[in-house]
Image: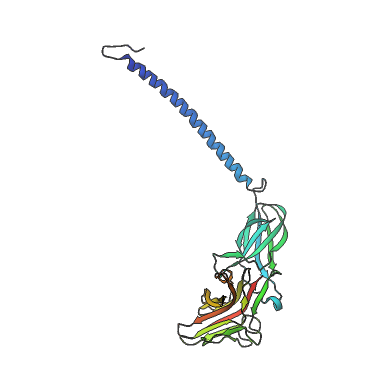
Amino acid sequence: MFKSFPGHDNNIHKNRSFTLKGLTRLRVMMSRRFLQILISFFFLLFLLAQTSCEKFSGDQTIPAYLDIDSIRLTTDYSTQGTAIHNITDAWVYIDGEFIGTFQLPATFPVLKEGSHELSVLPGIKKDGIATTRISYQFYKPVVKTIKLVPDSTVKTGLLSTTYNTSTKFMWKEDFDDVAITLDTTKSTTVKIEQTPTGSPLTLEGLHSGIAEFDTVGATFSAVSHTTFYIPSSAVFLEMNFNMDTYLTVGVYVSVNGVVYELPVIYLNPTNDKWKKIYIDLSNILNAYTGGSAFRVFFYQKETSTGHHRILLDNIKLVSY
């Protein structure tokens, strides 16, 4: 009990005593609240850990490994043309579950064990661009049964695909026949011809197509001999090319009697190397309402001095 003295108010001591008791209660309450928050935090961490574990198959924590070396293409040359391809990726499914897309060759983990159905969709770079990788719908998936063992690697080896049976080859040009199915236009000063028999410039077969430039302003302008109807499904132009200059590839689209010239892609020099490309024509063929027919064109007007050439082979126009 506080002793009073003149001029001193006992209520001050009473209030101070009350304040001290309140602070004590507040500290106790805060300690309890902190303990509750701490318990809730650890409980949340536990739930997150449990949820993460549930993403995997059962209690398996040690993966098996799948090794895919490459995918080859086999064709009936007489009806499907060359087997040269540029399959760069594998789109992998196991029992219908998408595992991922992998650049070949690839070795990757899979949290599964035992026998499973492996399905691999051959993947390409659409328009030759690394950032537009797709599974190529005109190639069949490779399907086989595999047995996965944790901490072991299953090698699939060389996988083999073919064209889907529903693939329609609208146009094939391998430059081996007497007649070439590319017509030069009135503006051309450079012809498309066949490489000589036995020429080291030929990619495969008897001949490749060649266009040679010797002067500035020399122009190569050629168009498919056939006019094609625009299908309601996807359309891709496949081709091999080797050149030390540039080349524009596009389509002439007929819309209600009016023909539009539509460039699709500009190809760069290949440094004396043959390349295979898959050019998607689908979007541009449907860019105009009422478009009914189209032809494929190739164009280059030389702007530099010296001798230049364009080599083409194995042109295919595919759809469904």
Question: Residue 18 at x, y = what percent?
Answer: 39, 19
Question: Residue 169 at x, y = what percent?
Answer: 67, 75
Res 201 visible: no
The quarter of the picture where the C terminus appears is bottom right
In the image, is 131 to the left or to the right of 156? Answer: left
259 or 199: nearer the eye? 259
Compared to residue 140, the image places residue 60 above or below, namely: above
The quarter of the picture where the N terminus appears is top left
Q: Residue at x 30, y 11 (%)?
A: 4
Res 217 visible: yes
183 or 100: nearer the eye? 183
Which residue is situated farthest in the front direction here?
Answer: 256
Question: Residue 168 at x, y = what percent?
Answer: 68, 73
Q: Residue at x 44, y 26 (%)?
A: 27
Q: Residue at x 46, y 25 (%)?
A: 28
| Picture quadrant of residue 318 | bottom right
201 or 276: nearer the eye? 276
Compared to residue 290, the image places residue 50 above or below, namely: above
Q: Residue at x 57, y 42 (%)?
A: 48
The figure's colour scheme reads rainbow
Q: How many numbered tags mark residues here? A: 0
Compared to residue 42, the image places residue 109 above or below, namely: below
Compared to residue 75, the image places residue 194 above or below, namely: below
In the image, is 118 to the left or to the right of 32? Answer: right
Question: Residue 6 at x, y = what percent?
Answer: 26, 11
